Amino acid sequence: MRIAILGVGSIGAVILGCLSDTDAELVAVSRGTRSSELANEGIVMHSPEGAIDVIPPERYITVDSESGPINQSLRKSCDAVIISGKSSSTPILSQIAEELLSEGGVVMSIQNGLGHAEIIASRVGRSPVIGGTTTHGAWRGENGSHWVGRGSIRMGNLDGGPANGGAELLYQYLSEASLNPEWDLDIQRSIWTKLLINVAINPICSIAGVRNGALLESTYLWDQALSAMSEASSVAHASGVDLGDLDLEELLREVAKSTADNRCSMLQDLMSGRKTEIESICGAIVSKGEDTGIPTPRNSILLALVKGIESSSQLD
């Protein structure tokens, strides 16, 4: 099986590194400096247990998405494509996925936020698209990629149903790679649940400049996070998403505790002067709120504040 990873940042590097222990042929798609690093230096991955693994560049094929058209030998050659890049890159990554995907292949997005599967489906059709979400924790530094928390990858057909064909084979490879895949018969619910967590943690911790665990230590931060999460839950229900008997406060407390030492990806982006995914997180809630008539003042404020920080960092 040939598997392409589109966007080899923090989580993408973990997935690529773990899959390197299987017999899958791998394609690493990145851009610019990151692509050069992958091609020349390989991947240095720090495991949650403290081990350091080095994946040599010969283990995978590197593609620089900015260097021109995809090599003809790679076109329509990938049985599975995993998109883990930033939400702002989804349109271009979807185009690359279309070029790489073989007949009968599948595309899975594990990106944060909403709307990615629909963008991908507009390029490759709906049936090959698998929705996904992950709780693996990772960050990337000068000395390599740090896998700081083992989690799982929830994956499922957009319209429900069991895994079959290419989806089943991808599931088997992710399992062999110890990435703990879980097949989800209602992936939309899982994507929304992950969004509720992102809405609560990412913007609050990014604006305050704190690790996730600070939410448990400050009543002020906790109340803001829970308020944003509650708004998002109301939008989900109005959008026809069945969240069941989900206890928002319990869920937030559990995630904040298990990731207490983590800097969320949005904070990492702001610290590095990169554009964040706030548009596909709080921005998605605001947009859906407008569509369904649900007021979202908290998410609107968080959206504006994070975008303001982005703009100010670009001006410095």
Image: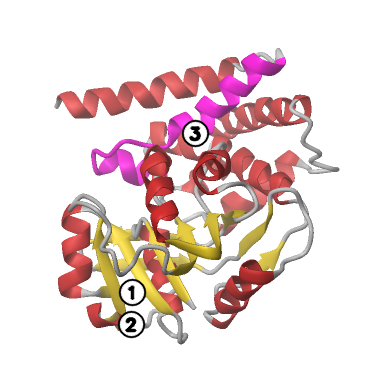
SS class of the residue under badge 1? strand
Chain-order first, disc 2 or disc 3: 2
Circle 3 is placed at which residue position? 280
SS class of the residue under badge 3? helix
- Label 1 to label 3: alpha-carbon separation: 28 Å
In the image, taking residue 245 as reference, residue 65 lies left or right, namely left
Q: Position of residue 184 (x, y in %)?
A: 73, 59
Circle 2 is placed at which residue position? 53
The amino acid type, in three-letter code, at marker 2 is: Asp
Q: Position of residue 87 (x, y in %)?
A: 43, 41
Q: Position of residue 101 (x, y in %)?
A: 46, 61
The amino acid type, in three-letter code, at marker 3 is: Ser
Circle 1 is placed at which residue position? 45
**How is this picture coloured?**
secondary structure
As drawn, 207 above or below 29: above
Chain-order first, disc 2 or disc 1: 1
In the image, taking residue 224 as reference, residue 268 lies left or right, namely left
Chain-order first, disc 1 or disc 3: 1
Q: Quadrant of the C terminus?
A: top left
In the image, taking residue 310 as reference, residue 232 lies left or right, namely right
Neighbourhood count class around disc 3 (C-alpha, 10 Å): few under 14, some 14–19, many 20 upward: many
**Taking the image as drawn, is residue 148 in sight?**
yes
As drawn, 87 above or below 36: above
Q: Nearer the viewer, mark 2 or mark 3?
A: 3
Looking at the image, which is closer to me, 1 or 14?
1
Neighbourhood count class around disc 1 (C-alpha, 10 Å): few under 14, some 14–19, many 20 upward: many
Q: Magenta residues: mostly which secondary structure?
A: helix
Q: Is residue 97 magenta?
A: no
The amino acid type, in three-letter code, at marker 1 is: Met
Callouts 2 and 1 close, C-beta under 8 Å:
yes
Q: Quadrant of residue 296?
A: top right
Q: Please provide the residue range marked out in magenta.
A: 266-292
